[in-house]
Amino acid sequence: MDRILEPEIMDGEAEADAYARADFADSNQWYADHFTGEYPSHLWEVVDLGCGPADVTLRVARAAPHARIVAVDGSAPMLEFARKAVHSAKLSDRVTLHLGRLPGLSLPQHHFDAVLSKDMLHHLPDPQVLWSEVRRLGRPGAAVYVMDLIRPDSPVLAREIVERVAAHEHPVLKEDFYNSLCAAFTVSEIRSQLESAGLPLTVEQVTDRHMRIKGILSP
């Protein structure tokens, strides 16, 4: 099926609450474990784009005790959930929350040793916004680790994934998950995006619904 852009819904408190309470523990822990295991020399200055309630951010911070992480999200209600989670985890000294949307984040250029993003790419009408920000924020030799949904072949398959993965979640979250699947890209589309952006990153499907984009920025 063709890509269907999802509506912007995460600025509302009810939507942010539904998302923050959802159980993404398995994929979030997979992401944190694989990133920290594959790039142990890049766990210093890290930026997490589209951090949501900071669950991935905190899992990475726990696994990388020397890392300093800037966690970015465009939703103030979502960052309030993130603030509470960071405070509860007693990691406020290493995790800084930043309210901002791509492009145009007020963060230093070529500063970060790693640029992370999980489940944000499909929210962007123009995916090159992410890839240009990755290049701008990462230092030469920085690690890039992005994970995102893969668009199913049909709306019916998208509904089946929602019911298999999130059958007991809040209806708002289930509808957002469906919209996200329909707004996601295919692996081949991501490869074309990276070629256009001139980024030497690899793309592979890693679960029934996720792809991983990773690599090192050229010096």
Image (cartoon, grey):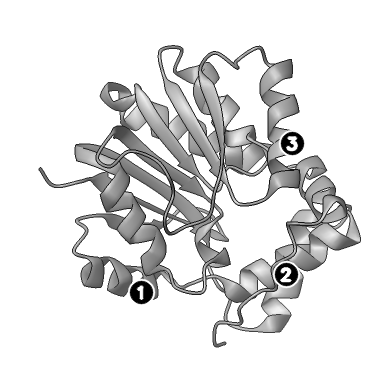
Q: Which of pointers 2 and 3 lies earlier in the amino acid sequence? A: 3
The circle on residue 178 is 2
Report the number of discs: 3
Q: Looking at the rendering, which quadrant does residue 96 occupy?
A: top right
| Nearest the eye: 67 or 29 | 67
Residue shown at 37% from the left, 41% from the top = 115
Relative to the observer, which residue lies in front, 152 or 57? 57
The amino acid marked with disc number 3 is Glu
Q: Residues within 10 Å of mark 2 (few under 14, many from 20)?
A: many
On residue 80, the disc is: 3
Task: Answer above or below: position of 154 versus 41.
Answer: below
Residue depth check, mark 1 versus mark 3: number of the one nearer the observer: 3
Q: Residue at x 77, y 60 (%)?
A: 164
**Residue name at image x 70 percent, y 46 percent:** 76
Please provide percent x and percent y for residue 155.
Answer: 69, 82
At horizontal 83% and vertical 46% (from top left) the residue drawn is: 17
| Quadrant of residue 22 within the rendered picture | top right
Label whose residue precedes the other's in the sequence (1 or 2): 2
For label 1, the residue is 188
In the displayed structure image, the side of residue 100 where residue 218 appears, left or right:
left
Where is residue 68? Give x, y as percent.
Answer: 43, 21
Q: Secondary structure at mark 1?
A: helix
Q: Answer with left or right where residue 14 lies relative to residue 62.
A: right
Which kind of residue does numbered mark 1 sit on? Ser
Alpha carbon distance from label 1 to label 2 = 21 Å
Q: Nearer the viewer, residue 174 or 45?
A: 45
Residue in front for this viewpoint, 10 or 210: 10
Q: Amino acid at mark 2?
A: Tyr
Answer with left or right where residue 218 lies relative to residue 78. left
Mark 1–mark 3 Cα distance, whole angstroms, equals 36 Å
